[in-house]
Image: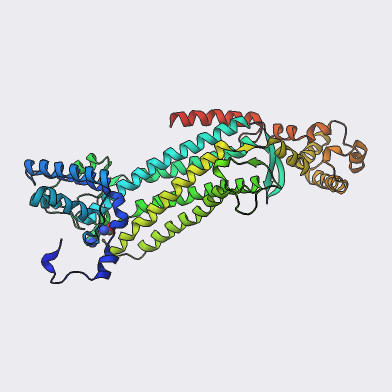
Amino acid sequence: MWGGRFAEGPSAIMREINASIPFDKALWRQDIAASRAHVAMLAACGIVADADAETILAGLEQVAAEYEANGVPENWDLEDIHMTTESRLAELIGPVAGRLHTARSRNDQVATDFRLWVRDAIDQVDAGLAALQRALVMQAQAHADSIMPGFTHLQTAQPVTLGHHLLAYYEMIARDRSRFADARTRMNVSPLGSAALAGTGFPIDRHMTAQALGFAAPMRNSLDGVSDRDFALDYLQAAAQCSLHLSRLAEEFVIWASQPFGFVRMADSLSTGSSIMPQKKNPDAAELVRGHAGRIVGCLTSLMVTMKGLPLAYSKDMQDDKPPVFEAANLLGLSIAAMTGMVADSTFRTDRMRQAAELGYATATDLADWLVRQANIPFREAHHITGAAVKLAESRGIALDELSLEDLQAFDTRIDQRVYAALSVEASVAARASYGGTAPDQVRARVAEAMQELEQG
Ligand code: ARG
């Protein structure tokens, strides 16, 4: 491609270190689309003859058909997807293929292709996350009344409903989707026509190519056009944060599926057995989602460090932008699909959850609140009385509402029979009907809103 300037070919190591075709062949659809838009524009602007443009477009169509049928050939001498396509085009249509690269550089070409790829990846992620949200909402609807212990410090805190717990993840995923959508809007501008770095002397129409590729506008600065990788970083940032949410949800399943908890029975389809312990059913999918989050964060770190010291405009370091993005996209897609299946197909053992809520003195706050409301005791004093009651119940190995009225009155004479109504886990969750609270009616209201949101897309 640049033989004119060189007396000698590259060494074996140069060819190998330089070749990006093993991974950037993933960009072939975007590369063909961008070339089509470019050559159509060159013809419309009178830079390439219409007949030549027709020949090039037909040739590109044939190259695409070959890639579709047989995959992209990997020849290190051709370095990357751009040269691979151009050289095959030349084999097919002859020297007229050389007109395609008029007013274009691989620098704006790769920036365009990669941006298109990331934009597509965002659309795919969004569809996957919507499916995960649907699974969460369906289970939340089924379990609006199912009571489980809510935790702080992984110690039983207050009873919550399982529906409420699952809807917390719906909210996280909603923020992820909005982060991806923000990133998509911000990245949806076209670098094509920035050429190598300075723009071009040919009378091109960058608005035309931008429009043809679905971009909102051309980028306003050619140096920025070829050297900006914020779009890839924005994507990885959103992917990393999303992977943290998936990992936290996965961790809940790992804990809930453990025998001492026994809150969930995972679907066989997302579990594995042990080669030695016949009783085992392991939550490997959840653990891998947890593990993948680490790798996705690593991908973000990798590209941030690649970009941090680069002067304008293009440097070859930037060829290393693609592997972390491709890897993160693959891992994120798998993680979303695994968690969607896990949420949809797990059986929640509501009996075990309810029992755990009852055994953990989860309604102690309700006793303290009752003392404040019914007996007009200052909260700090009520907290102290309740603590003593929990201590007594614990020493006897019984629940709070199994203490006799005499026992309770020994702590404070203002306590009467009505207190027992406040000590059940049902009363506890029903009482938390503040907006966004765990009360079953609140959960049902949120489920209805979420279903509407999902329908509207
Ligand atoms: N394969 C290169 C990449 O992925 C394409 C751009 C090459 N540009 C250059 N000036 N060598 O970044």
Quadrant for the C terminus, please. top left
Side (left or right) of 358 relative to 28: right
Q: Position of residue 273 (x, y in %)?
A: 59, 49
Q: Residue at position x 83%, y 34% from top?
A: 419
Q: Which of the 4 quarters of the picture holds residue 264?
A: top right
Q: Which of the 4 quarters of the picture holds residue 136?
A: top right
- Displayed-image quarter of ligand 1: bottom left
Closer-to-camera residue (420/133) = 133
User: Can you see residue 290?
Assistant: yes
Closer-to-camera residue (129/414) = 129
User: Can you see residue 218?
Assistant: no
Q: Position of residue 14 (x, y in %)?
A: 26, 69
Q: Which of the 4 quarters of the picture holds residue 311?
A: bottom left
Quadrant for the N terminus, please. bottom left
Side (left or right) of 73 relative to 274: left
Closer-to-camera residue (259/383) = 259
Q: Residue at position x 72%, y 36% from top?
A: 351
Q: Position of residue 211 (x, y in %)?
A: 23, 40
